[in-house]
């Protein structure tokens, strides 16, 4: 009988962990999972405190392992690209991630752009075949604001032997987008309006503008103003309905480097359950260098003015 009871409790714990694998977790929900062997908290923050201490060792969610966001990105000249498969595999294994492990991603929680980092890591792990995934809503800032416990130890975990099998149904490539009929697909630009309208560009992009046939939905609209806290699901549904983002339409989310776009992908695919939503990871940095048609491209004089502004910011800021 004791053995049967122990087995039942073990199974109950596993079921409980899987039941919590919802896209967003509030701080108190994550607190309830602390100490669960089938839950891995992945802290993607990087950088240092004003005192020069790494933010991770200055304080983190108990049990969290450090995997800075830069590990999940592509090379400097194409940061939106997925990391090489061998590098991605090594990162996933080093974190002890596997299909039965519930990964909870924790970002700094500073603003909506910061949330995009968590959404991008979530998408990357899902592309890698992992499905038990969550994001801490509001990030580490929300955790500390709730006066929940923190630790400063460097957590080490046993490596897994998981071999990712990429789910390419979540990825939109440049060639695939070029072959699409804009009338039959939703091309969703997640950037602020100035990027969409060609009034500015990302430093790594060749020219300002957007994809032909694209519509604009600024990713920041999913959040409480000035925070990294995603709005409740019913409010997200209203936002999607008002912008006519719901419905059975293939959607490709893009931005400059697949960061802001990951938030729109996350909102539609994971929070709202829309089908056939893809992310163009390299986004406009890649597209603008390809010579393919673009919309909202300013005249040459305006492009030169934008170039000058970017140079000034890069040089003197």
Image (cartoon, rainbow, N blue to C red):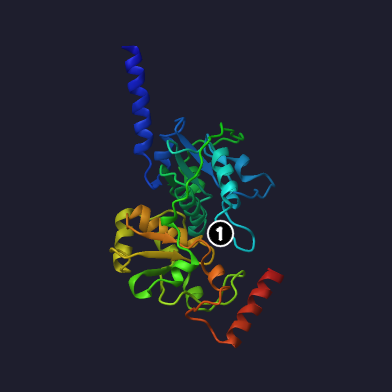
Q: Position of residue 305 (x, y in %)?
A: 62, 83
Task: Give residue 290's quadrant in the image.
Answer: bottom right
**Up-down relation of residue 45 to residue 80 (above or below):** above
Q: Secondary structure at mark 1?
A: loop
Residue 180 visible in image: yes
Residue 224 visible in image: no
Residue identified by numbered label 1: 81
> Please, which residue is most extreme toward the right here?
315
Going 42% across and 45% down the picture, which residue do you hit? Answer: 134
**Up-down relation of residue 91 to residue 75 (above or below):** above
> Please, which residue is most extreme toward the top here?
1
Going 61% across and 49% down the picture, which residue do you hit? Answer: 46
Please identify the quadrant where the C terminus is shown: bottom right
* Residue situated in front as seen by the camera: 180 or 26: 180
Please identify the quadrant where the N terminus is shown: top left
Going 53% across and 50% down the picture, which residue do you hit? Answer: 108
Task: Give residue 54's quadrant in the image.
Answer: top right
Q: Position of residue 166 (x, y in %)?
A: 47, 50
* Residue situated in front as seen by the camera: 52 or 159: 159
Q: Position of residue 201 (x, y in %)?
A: 56, 73
Task: Give residue 29's quadrant in the image.
Answer: top left
């Amino acid at each position: 009988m004791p053995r049967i009871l122990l087995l039942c409790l073990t199974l109950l714990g596993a079921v409980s962990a899987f039941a919590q694998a919802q896209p967003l977790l509030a701080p108190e929900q994550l607190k309830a999972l602390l100490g669960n062997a089938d839950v891995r908290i992945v802290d993607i923050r990087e950088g240092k405190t004003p005192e020069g201490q790494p933010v991770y060792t200055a304080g983190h969610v108990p049990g969290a392992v450090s995997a800075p966001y830069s590990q999940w990105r592509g090379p400097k000249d194409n940061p939106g690209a997925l990391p090489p498969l061998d590098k991605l595999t090594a990162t996933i294994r080093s974190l002890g991630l596997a299909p039965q492990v519930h990964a909870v991603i924790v970002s700094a929680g500073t603003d909506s752009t910061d949330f995009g980092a968590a959404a991008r890591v979530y998408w990357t792990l899902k592309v890698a075949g992992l499905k038990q995934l969550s994001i801490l809503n509001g990030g580490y800032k929300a955790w500390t604001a709730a006066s929940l416990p923190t630790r400063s130890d460097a957590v080490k975990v046993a490596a897994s032997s998981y071999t990712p099998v990429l789910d390419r149904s979540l990825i939109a490539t440049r060639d695939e987008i070029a072959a699409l009929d804009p009338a039959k697909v939703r091309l969703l630009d997640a950037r602020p309006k100035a990027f969409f309208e060609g009034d500015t560009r990302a430093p790594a992009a060749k020219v300002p503008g957007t994809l032909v046939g694209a519509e604009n939905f600024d990713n920041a609209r999913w959040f409480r103003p000035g925070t990294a806290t995603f709005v409740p699901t019913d409010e997200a549904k209203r936002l999607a309905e008002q912008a006519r983002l719901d419905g059975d339409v293939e959607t490709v989310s893009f931005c400059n480097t697949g960061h802001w776009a990951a938030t729109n992908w996350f909102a539609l695919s994971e929070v709202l359950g829309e089908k056939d939503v893809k992310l163009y990871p390299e986004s406009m940095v890649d597209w603008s260098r390809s010579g393919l048609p673009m919309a909202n491209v300013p005249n040459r004089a305006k492009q030169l003015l934008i170039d000058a502004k970017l140079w000034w910011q890069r040089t003197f800021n």
